Amino acid sequence: MATRSGAVLASGTANAAKFVVAALAFTAAYAGLSAYGIASSAEAPAPTAVSLSAEETPVTTALTARALAAGTVTVSALPAGPGCLKPYVARTLLVNPDPGRTVSYSWKLARWSPSAKTWRTYFVDYSGFAGARGTAEWEATVSGNPGWYRVELAVEGAKTVKSDRFQVSC
């Protein structure tokens, strides 16, 4: 008897759910048609003139010039996010000795561990490019973990290049 009652209850619940879905669909369609009728009776707005301006700013800072030197990695802070979100961007210039071949490389954000007295991996990202030269840029965010950090760039077939260390504080 309990099985038959359960089946009736389940089918009643399913029918009620179908009814609710159908009622919502009908209400949405009615509201959409009503809004369409109101929108089509409104007057079109008068055209307005828009003027745009742009200013060209050359990127010739000492930081950018240093960042584009092959064999160096420069790290710059980006505008901080809410709370203790600290975004950073690392840049370098990569030179491919064989432009016909793709070069793979990896970025690593490392954090200094005072207890172990060593650099520990905090975040890693992989990429690559084909061509003779390429500017590589990588963004990493430190969230609520103050300390000393550095960025390491490992290029396939070359030695790892490390940035200067930088301190993250909240």
Image (cartoon, rainbow, N blue to C red):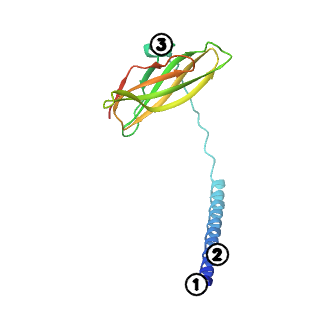
Residue type of the residue flagged with mark 1: Ala
The single residue placed furthest to the bottom in the displayed view is 1
Q: Which residue is mark 3?
A: 65
Residue 92: x, y in percent? 50, 18
Which numbered circle lies on residue 2?
1
- Which quadrant of the rendered structure holds the N terminus? bottom right
Residue 41 in the figure: left or right of residue 56: right
Q: Is residue 131 left or right of residue 114?
A: right
Q: Residue 147's x, y, as percent?
A: 33, 31
Residue 170 image-quadrant placement:
top left
Mark found first going from the N terminus, 1 or 3: 1
**In the rendered image, the vertical position of residue 133 relative to residue 123, given as above or below:** above
Q: Earlier in the sequence, mark 3 or mark 2?
A: 2
Kind of residue indicated by mark 3: Ala
- Toward the viewer: 88 or 112? 112
Mark 2 lies on residue: 15
Q: Are marks 1 and 3 in contact (CB under 8 Å)?
A: no
Other residues around mark 2 within 10 Å, as few (<14) / some (14–19) / many (≥20): few
Query: Regarding mark 1 in the picture, which secondary structure is present there?
Result: helix
Q: Earlier in the sequence, mark 1 or mark 2?
A: 1
Q: Position of residue 81 (x, y in %)?
A: 41, 36
Element on which disc 2 rests: helix
| Residue occupying the point 61% across, 39% down | 47
Q: Position of residue 120 (x, y in %)?
A: 40, 30
Q: Under tag 3, what secondary structure?
A: helix
Q: Which residue is at a point 62% across and 22% down the rendered structure image?
A: 129
Gap between marks 3 and 2 measured at Cα: 70 Å
Q: Residues within 10 Å of mark 3 (few under 14, many from 20)?
A: few
- Residue type (three-letter) at the residue carrying disc 2: Asn
The residue lying at 32 percent from left, 32 percent from top is 169
